[in-house]
Image: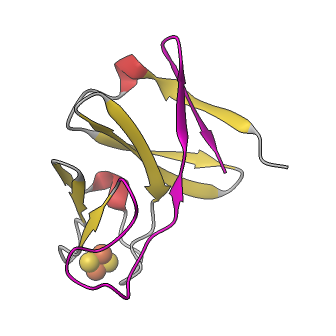
């Protein structure tokens, strides 16, 4: 059964930024899109680049290695409909952020 895991606080993740957290050996990228929080796998499906270290532009993240782009709200690629990254729901409780793997 999936459980909620605390991944930080809202103060750790300012609007327009991303960060990487590790949960049970899984690298997860967290994003703040204008006060809305999203989480995806940190691994770019191209060659494993760290998406959480990429640039967040609106609701898309640009992989820092070769600039593939993903919509962090649903994991889709605006460029290649065959590519998708896993997404995880983010819950905000007070000031704390949780995700469900
Ligand atoms: S590893 Fe992400 S674009 Fe190449």
Observer-nearest residue: 18 or 59?
Answer: 59
Residue extending farthest to the left is: 57
- Which residue appears at 24% of the width and 58% of the height? 61
Q: Position of residue 34 (x, y in %)?
A: 22, 32
- Which residue appears at 26% of the width and 85% of the height? 80
Left or right, 72 with reference to 79:
right
Q: Position of residue 30 (x, y in %)?
A: 42, 44
Q: Quadrant of ligand 1?
A: bottom left
- Which residue appears at 40% of the width and 21% of the height? 10
Image: magenta residue range: 73-101
User: Where, by quadrant of the figure, is residue 51 drawn?
Assistant: bottom left
Vertical order, 4 against 81 (above or below): above
Vertical order, 57 against 45 (above or below): above
Q: Position of residue 41 (x, y in %)?
A: 49, 61
Residue 91 within the segment the image draws in magenta: yes
Observer-nearest residue: 93 or 17?
Answer: 93
Overall secondary structure of the magenta stretch?
loop
- Which residue appears at 25% of the width and 67% of the height? 63
């Amino acid at each position: 059964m999936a459980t909620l895991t605390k991944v930080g606080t809202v103060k750790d993740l300012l609007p327009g930024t991303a960060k990487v957290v590790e949960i049970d050996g899984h690298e997860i990228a967290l994003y703040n899109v204008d006060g809305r929080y999203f989480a995806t796998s940190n691994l770019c499906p191209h060659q494993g680049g760290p998406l959480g270290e990429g640039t967040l532009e609106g609701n898309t993240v640009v992989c820092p290695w070769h600039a593939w782009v993903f919509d962090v709200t649903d994991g889709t690629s605006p460029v290649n409909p065959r590519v998708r990254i896993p997404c995880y729901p983010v819950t905000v409780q007070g000031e704390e952020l949780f995700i469900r793997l």
